[in-house]
Image (cartoon, rainbow, N blue to C red):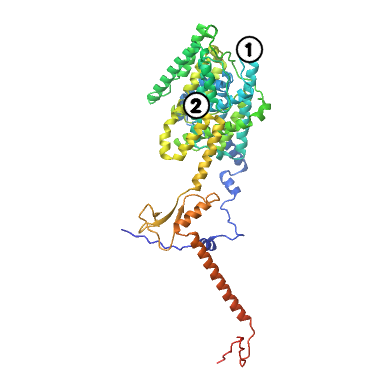
Amino acid sequence: MSEVTISRSIYTEDQFDQHFSRSCGEERVPERSWKQMVSRSCASSGNTWRCFVRARFPCLTWLPRYKFKRWLAGDIIAGLTVGIIHIPQGMAFALLTSVAPIYGLYTSFFPVMLYILFGTGRHVSTGTFAGISLMTGSIVERLVPRQWNVTSLEDSELEKQRISVASAVAFLSGLMMICMFVLQLGFLSTYLSDPIVKAFTSGTAFHVTISQLNTMLGLQLPRFAGPFTIFKTLASVFGALSATNIVELIISLICLSVLILTKELSSRFREKFRTPIPIEVVMIIVATTITFATSLDECCNVQVVGHIPAGFPIPQLPALESIPSIIGDTIAITFVGYAVSVSLATIYADKHKYKIDPNQELLAHGISNTISSLFTCFPSSASLATSNILESTGSSTQLAGFFTCLVVLVVLLLIGPLFYSLPKAVLACINITSLRQMFLQFQDLPELWRVSKMDFMVWVVTWLAVITLNADLGLAVGVVFSMMTVICRTQRVGCSVLGRASNSEIYRPVDSTMCQEIPGLKILSYHAPIYYGNKSYFRDTMAKLIGLTPEKIKKKEERKKALERVKKMAINTIDHGLTQPRCPASATPSPSGGALPLHTG
């Protein structure tokens, strides 16, 4: 058995500072100046701009290095598959936003094209997202309430106002993200932890499901906003059950049964299928054909999508005059969209061993929302379902988004008008079944309880707040509660005395191990920074561990003051003796003292 002897000096803080700290006037010379670092990475000013452009346009980095033989097939299959899924989801999520389905197709095209140029996530599918669409729809319904029994001309005018407000939300959200990029505020996404994001998405899944009940039942009911939205909607639906359209109810039940069964089969036999079954597209085609052939919209009053124009929209400014009324809600939408997008990008980046730039993601989604809003698009972000499909079907780079856009482009230019007779109940069923992953997040709760009970509480509080209050208020409650848990964790952190294991330099708490304290030395371990919030707790805990009661501290302070007074008196006596004039050697001392005789010897 070999032994190692380690000999080292023991310093107090003052002694260490005397030996190793730098003086006030002495500054450390950096190893490389900023110019040297720039010149090392970019040899000339031209290369400096080239590096800057590549950083802002990541496509200029990965596209020249694209491995066609290795990546192209997977990107084509994944892109086409996600494009097929984007068609029904885009139209369905447009209903959540309270706008016409065609605008969901626009939002599934323009943001995807822009993210290819500016995004750093290779496996992120952008476009419509249920939570963002639901929050945007609440703003639209608040500013432009839906009205029933109006003429087609009046309904067309209201539709323009609704999409103009939704585009204004996207425009303002994009500007906020760009400003955050300029200020390098990408780190703010860390305050939306995984429990908060997952609880928020699970809560919004319930909001989406409840909000689609009136469409599935064929009821014409107002859409509620604000706190207790779920309960208000349920009360309204139950009060109007007698007016249910039986045909739309049958359509909804059949669609739900087929969609749920097919998705469960696809999930269980995922390894055998290279791509998921596009059951949503099949359902849309079948439902549209049956409705058109039987004229259900006329004879049974089934609500259909209506006219879908072919081609691209004319660029126009959104309703900028509504910006003062939507700032507060847009801040919540911005943070949610960015947090979900960065979380997904980080998950897949860690899985496939590459890095993303959170600040560049701010720029990518900011530009996507800002420019897309000029083409009548509502807010977009990364999508949970389509990102999972994109990664599982073999995507390797952002080029898969190009093939996704090709599919949507074909629908916009050629096939869109054919969906005139598509029942809205089918889109509502697609909305609900697309939230399968969000509902399955409840399965993670037992594991979360075992790992961290505090994170479990954050999840539960956020979910309950989203359900009872609303999406934006619930998110704010979750963030505040999460920050409170962080403060509580730092205020009541355990403090322990460390001891050394025999014949080693390993130190562990003495109360849970066989390690022994070093005689005459107390080593304390405190697992948190010391600040004003926990200084009293740390002081009391430290005094208790080392046996320093207030009485002992007071006695030591009194003893120290007494020693200082004695020392001061002694110094004064010595100084007084040194300042007295010397007497002659024959002088006789006075009775009161005076000068002492000097023995010359």
Q: Which of 432 and 179 is in front in this view?
A: 432
Q: Where is residue 466 in the image (x, y as percent from the top left)?
A: 52, 30
Residue 499 at x, y percent in the picture: 40, 57
Q: Which residue is drawn at 58% across and 13% down?
A: 307
Q: What residue do we see at 54% from left, 49% from top?
A: 533
Q: Is residue 87 left or right of residue 575?
A: left
Viewer-proximal residue among 194 and 214: 214
Label placed on residue 152: 1
Query: Image quadrant of residue 271?
Result: top left
Q: Residue drawn at (56%, 44%), measured in percent from left and top?
A: 41
The numbered disc on residue 435 is none
- Residue 59: in sight, yes or no? no
Q: Mark 2 points at which residue?
A: 205
Q: Earlier in the sequence, mark 1 or mark 2?
A: 1
Marks 1 and 2: which is nearer the front?
2
Measured along the vertical axis of the image, is residue 109 above or below residue 191? above
Q: Which residue lies furthest to the left in this view?
A: 1
User: Which quadrant holds the N terminus?
Assistant: bottom left
What separation in Å lies between label 1 and label 2 (alpha carbons)? 32 Å
